[in-house]
Image: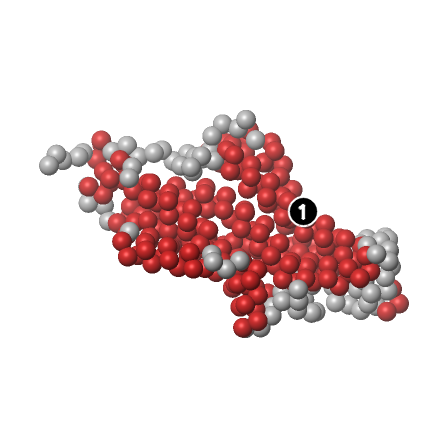
Amino acid sequence: MTAIAASQIVVPARSRPFRNFLRRDTTLTMTLSLLAALIVATLLGPLVWRAQPDSINLGAVLQAPSLGHPMGTDDTGRDVLARVLAGGQTSILAGLTIALIGAVLGCIAALLAGSMRGWVDTLFTWLTNSILCFPAILLAMAIAMALKPGVTAVVIGLSLHSFPWYMRTLRGEVMRLYGQDFIRSTMALGAHPARVLFRHVFPHLVPIMILQMAAVFGAAVLSLAALGYLGLGAQPPTAEWGEMITDGQQFFLTGQWWIAGFPGLGLLLAVSLTTLIADRAREVLDPRGEFVQAK
């Protein structure tokens, strides 16, 4: 057997392609900036706009947008702007939580299945296929009804349904990386499997995880709103965009469009921006997780 010198191993250089790419791709940069502005405004807005989202004022019922109430009031006199900001916090924080939990679980499953193969790979493949047999909304509804309707139950259900998508995508990349010469050479030199996994394999998965998280975040916010619309998401008095649309739909045709219109606009912006980011990133991210020249 021929010995392999450490100097002969060629490991892909670690650069900062994502940062360099952002400097070239103005479309993605602007979209990311808009999404960041939406998230910051939603999370920090209540510090500026001090109106309480659950404060009832029967003397200011169904008021149109004005200086005192920039987004108007609802049928109980609650400030719609305050409720949109509070509902955005619920939706965005839940979406980020779902995307993060799914990424962690999916990455762990992909690393184990892709590196160990055999019965471990078979087990995780069977598990992901079983979970994906159920639509995300249906699985979240079942968990919400089995536990208790609310944001926590929805987060559990949607996180459980999101991790197979991470696992499927990352598992193939892990298997591809283990077939590369630099991984084979590192293993031949006696490197510990954990070191190979976390030092040489995991860094190549991060760009793909970020891409997947953007897509999962948008889908999670939309699913949370759909479940809130059905009454299985956030429960009163917690504000949430889907629940606000449900409350305001009866007033839409009578002229009080702002009650459902503004939370619907927030939902549209959040989902559209994350979809644009995911689609644009997919165009410039090759299967090996390397950013290519922007068109």
Badge 1: residue crowd in 10 Å (few <14, some 14–19, many ≥20) = some
Residue that appears at 45% across and 59% down: 131
Q: Quadrant of the N terminus?
A: top left
Q: Quadrant of the C terminus?
A: top right
Image coordinates for residue 82, horizontal then vertical, percent: 74, 59
In the image shown, does 102 or 26 lie closer to the viewer?
102
Where residue 147 sits, quadrant-wise, is: bottom right
Residue that appears at 23% across and 38% down: 185
Q: Residue furthest front?
A: 133
How many dots with numbers? 1
Image coordinates for residue 284, horizontal then vertical, percent: 50, 33
In the image shown, does 190 or 272 lie closer to the viewer?
272
Q: Given the image, on which type of amino acid does mark 1 rest?
A: Leu
Q: Residue furthest right?
A: 59
Residue identifier under label 1: 269
Judge whether residue 199 can be spotted in this image.
no
Q: Residue furthest left?
A: 1
Judge whether residue 161 can be spotted in this image.
yes
The answer to whether residue 70 is left or right of residue 106 is: right
Residue that appears at 28% across and 39% down: 179
Image coordinates for residue 55, horizontal then vertical, percent: 77, 68
Residue that appears at 35% across and 45% down: 174
Where residue 53 sits, quadrant-wise, is: bottom right
Vertical placement of residue 20 versus 192, above or below: above
The answer to whether residue 290 is left or right of residue 233 is: left
The answer to whether residue 180 is left or right of residue 98 is: left
In the image shown, does 192 or 137 lie closer to the viewer?
137
Q: Residue furthest bottom?
A: 147
